[in-house]
Amino acid sequence: MEYVREFKASPPTSGIIACGVYTAGRRIADIPIEEAGEWAKKSGHVVWIGLLEPDRELLLRVKAQFHLHELAIEDAEHPHQRPKIEQYGDALFIVARTAQLIDGRVTFGETHLFVGSGYIVSVRHGPSTSYAAVRQHWESCPHSLAKGEDFVLYAILDFIVDNYMPVLEQIEDEVEAIEDKVLLKPMTGPDIERLYMLRRDLLRLRNAALPLVEVCRRLTSADLPQIHSAMHPLFRDVTDHIRTVQEKIDSLREVLAFAFEASLLVGQSQETAISKKLASWAAILAVPTAFAGIYGMNFTDMPELKMAYGYPMVLATIALICCFLYWRFRKNGWL
């Protein structure tokens, strides 16, 4: 599912971003946290709460409304969790990693989701795109939003996975530039450092995205009563998107590996070409050096020294041999 997204860093403010009640897919009221539990118990109503880097006091207020498990609250208070899904009583706790490209580096955030009967709570930590786009998109499609809190869960997970692709597209543009450059000249130190950073960021992104496959697999299993069976195809669709992200990451990592190998081959080829040139000129210069060495010996019995045309004949011989060697090396591609 595609959304209209704003790829900007999260606002610096934190706390309650939204707290609304929906019925039949339409928002009927914005409520305080203290009323969320009562609204969630009403048949046909769904409470959707969005929090940004909340403090413990706010999390405890949410916990009191929905009777959330203490371990889940501790995880939501302290980020740096790996993607996972846990079941605490009648509630699900899900962790997903978000990603944004900031100053050329992939920066990760976290989203923690509490899902239960009649409510869903999203807790964002670190860099991530606001989920306001998800709300706006699905509020314009009340028929879909009326499916309940498990549909909202699908919408958020799908949005998180979709936001991996713009990061990969920007990295892909840089990888293509590296490919074009590597065939022209060997990589410099900064080029190799940047290539290494890209490969490491891609690996971290893969480690962030791939565990969501297991999360979606659990969401399509029959042992989670919070998820209606009609939602299973949607979560399988999210799994397909994750697989696409994985294939994209793997292909980019392979291209970067090939680019590094190609750079090494280009460098070796240039070094070999220079060595051939140096060896060719050394062979050519060895000819006059040999003649000069021979006639620099102090022997008295050297008849050719007394010949009238001995000097020009030696110079002509040197020139002919040097020209022949130059032609031969040139023909073989050494010069």
Image (spheres, helix red, strand yellow):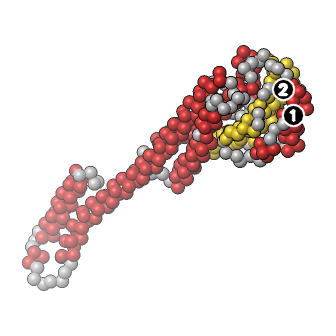
> Type of residue at label 1?
Gln
Taking the spot 81% from the left edge, 38% from the top edge, the residue there is 68
Q: Residue 327 location in percent, x, y?
A: 21, 54
Crowding at label 2, few (<14), some or many (≥20) Cα neighbours within 10 Å?
Answer: many
Label 2: which residue? 40
> Type of residue at label 2?
Ala
Which residue occupies the foreground of this view, 26 or 63? 63
Q: Residue 120 location in percent, x, y?
A: 77, 30
Whether residue 57 is visible: yes
Taking the spot 27% from the left edge, 60% from the top edge, the residue there is 280
Q: Earlier in the sequence, mark 1 or mark 2?
A: 2
Q: Quadrant of the N terminus?
A: top right
Taking the spot 54% from the left edge, 33% from the top edge, the residue there is 244
Q: Which mark is residue 65?
A: 1
Q: Quadrant of the C terminus?
A: bottom left
* Left-right relation of 214 to 143: left
**Where 31 sits versus 68, above or below?**
above
Which residue occupies the foreground of this view, 302 or 261? 261
Mark 1 falls on what kind of element?
helix
**Where 57 sits versus 303, above or below?**
above
Mark 1 → mark 2, Cα distance in angstroms: 9 Å
Instruction: Report how many numbered discs are placed on residues in the image.
Output: 2
Q: Are marks 1 and 2 in contact (CB under 8 Å)?
A: yes
* Left-right relation of 170 to 61: left
Taking the spot 21% from the left edge, 67% from the top edge, the residue there is 287
The picture quadrant where one finds residue 305 is bottom left
**Where 120 sits versus 27, above or below?**
below
Whether residue 170 is visible: no
